Each structure stands twice: as structure tokens, then as C-alpha cells.
Image (spheres, rainbow, N blue to C red):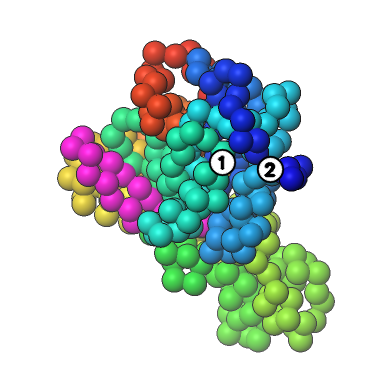
Amino acid sequence: MRTENSIHATMAVKPLYLGVDGGGSKTRAWLADEKGTVLGRGNTGTANINYTTRTSAVAAIRAACTQAFRSARVTESKVSGAWLGLAGMARACDRDWMKEQFSELAIKIEVSDDLHIAHCGGLAGDPGIVLVAGTGSACYGRNYTGQTWRCGGWGSLADDAGSASWLSQRAFQLAARQADGRATGNAIKDVVFDFLKIKNSEDFSQAVEGLSRYSRAQICPKLSSLYFEGDPLVKKLYKEAALALTEMITVTARQLEFSSPNVILSGAIASSKGPLHSLLCKELEKRLPTIQLCEPLYSPCAGAIMEAYRINNIDWRSNSISHFAK
């Protein structure tokens, strides 16, 4: 019996294509026709199996797809092609498992990590490097011979260097040090305590331990304010973040033997006009003066639809794809 969030096994009246972008905190789905017109969009929570249950991840993807059909006012149906670009899909066994969960979604379906579709959309299929720094962080590149390299993206415990979760974790550490006298000042402690809605140091450990990496990352706008106020510890923290992200790009460029690659800065932390973006651009100019910093041509969701076209032997470059830019 069909549930509300399921996808019909029947075929659509006209060829339709689904692109799904499942990042560290949000999942987006776009439904498009074969001419590049985006008909509907859906947005839900995280589908990263490393930070939520597999059941919840699948449910988030299904819900986003259902929203896309509804916003397009199209009856849910089996589409011609679908590409799911999801955070946490570095392992082939996980991609195969996720593909099986959505075998009814499309005639042809593939699953990749979210870096792949960010690269496809941001560079429109051309060689280059994409840095994604939002809740987490990672870097991905592809050169002119088709060779690829991934740097970073090892998760919040081992890596996520320079990301929002990384910045927040270090801010909490500095707050603890200010609270017990190991670090000077009180500004970071005051901001962190206000964010956690606590007044006493005794409540700090319990308040922090229950936070997800997405929840703790929400403190970053407050840290940005401290940066612009000139707090020396926060300025040092952002400098370290910029260096960590620069290192990812530098290593990726070296591994792929790029001399002057096009580089896309993606994700809320790297792409927004905040302190980290400015510091990162300065570090890149200093350490990699020959790179070309570019604005993303299209979104990761657009990149997913481009890949859905590709597996159906459709030349998306010949289509009108202006709708993909937003």
C-alpha cells in the first residue's frame, strides 16, 4: 500500500529528472524536465548517515523528493534519471546500499558524495577544485586527465578542519579555559554561555555534551561578531581555520599537478562574505598566486541534475539551463 512519502512505480508522462543534494545539515531535491527547467524543489534535514540513523536519512531524502513533486504540482512517479549527492557517502558499500533504497525512484539512478555534485555544478563539468566548508569541510578536485583527489572530510572527531563545527568546538574549548583561568579574558566565555543558555560554569559540561555538530555550529555568527570587535583569541582562531582550508586546496592542487586551477569556494563558511572568506582569499593569494578563484556557475542540486542527464545520454550543455543558477 502506498504511503504518503513513497514514490509511485509508474512512469512519468514526460521525462523527468531528480537531483538531490544532501549536505551536512540540509537535504535539497530538485525536479527538472529534459530542457533544464526546474519544476519543483524540496528541502528537509540532514541525510548524512554518519550523523543520523539510516532510517532518518532515507526519510529525509524521500520527504525532499515528495516536496519537489508537490511544488511542481506533478504526481509522484518513477523518473527517467536521478542522481543523489550525499554527505557521508565516501564508501562504495554505503553508496550501493543507498542506491538500493531508492531503486523505485528512477529508471537510472546513481549515488555519489556531495563533493562530486558541488564540483559538477560549480565548475559545470570542467576540471578544477571545489572546497566545501559549511557544517563540515572537505576538498575535491578533478584534473584534465580525469584523475580525482579528495582532501579532508574525515568527520568531526578526526577532521572537519576550518568548518563551522570545528570553529565552534574550539570556541567551547577556549570558553572552558577562560572559565577556569587558563586563558585570559571573558568575551568568548560570555558568548558561549549565552549561546548555551547557562549562567554557571558547573552547567557547562552537561550543556555541551548533548549538542550535535550542527547545533553547536550555530554559534558561528556570534564568533564572527567577536572577530570584528577585535577579540585576539577569535582572530587567531579564524586565522587557523583559513590556514587549514588553504592547506586542503594546496594539497589537492599538488596531487593533481595543477598549475593554475579554477577553484570554487562553497558552503556557508567559505562562501559567505564573513571573516573566514576574506582570510581564506588572502591566504590563497599568498600561497597559491596562480589559482583562479571563481564563483560557482551552478548549485550542487544543478550538478546532480546534470549528472542525471549524463547517465541518460543527454547533453545538458545544449539545453537552456539558466534556471539552475538559483
Residues in magenta, as a range: 134-151
Which image quarter is the C terminus in?
top right
Local crowd at mark 2 within 10 Å, few (<14), some, or many (≥20)?
some
Return the mark for residue 192: none
Where is residue 238 drawn, in percent x and y?
A: 50, 58
Real-space CA distance between mark 1 and mark 2, rounded to the nearest whole angstrom:
9 Å
Front in this rendered view, residue 72 or 164: 72
Report which residue position mark 1 lands on. 104
Does the magenta run of residues contain 273? no
Front in this rendered view, residue 200 or 314: 314
Question: The residue under label 1 is which amino acid type?
Answer: Glu
Where is residue 203 drawn, in percent x and y?
A: 77, 82
Cβ–Cβ below 8 Å for labels 1 and 2?
yes
Report which residue position mark 2 lands on. 6
Give the mark nearest the N terminus, 1 or 2: 2
Task: Please tell me in which quadrant of the rendered image residue 6 appears.
Answer: top right
**Is residue 140 found left or right of 229 in the rendered image?**
left
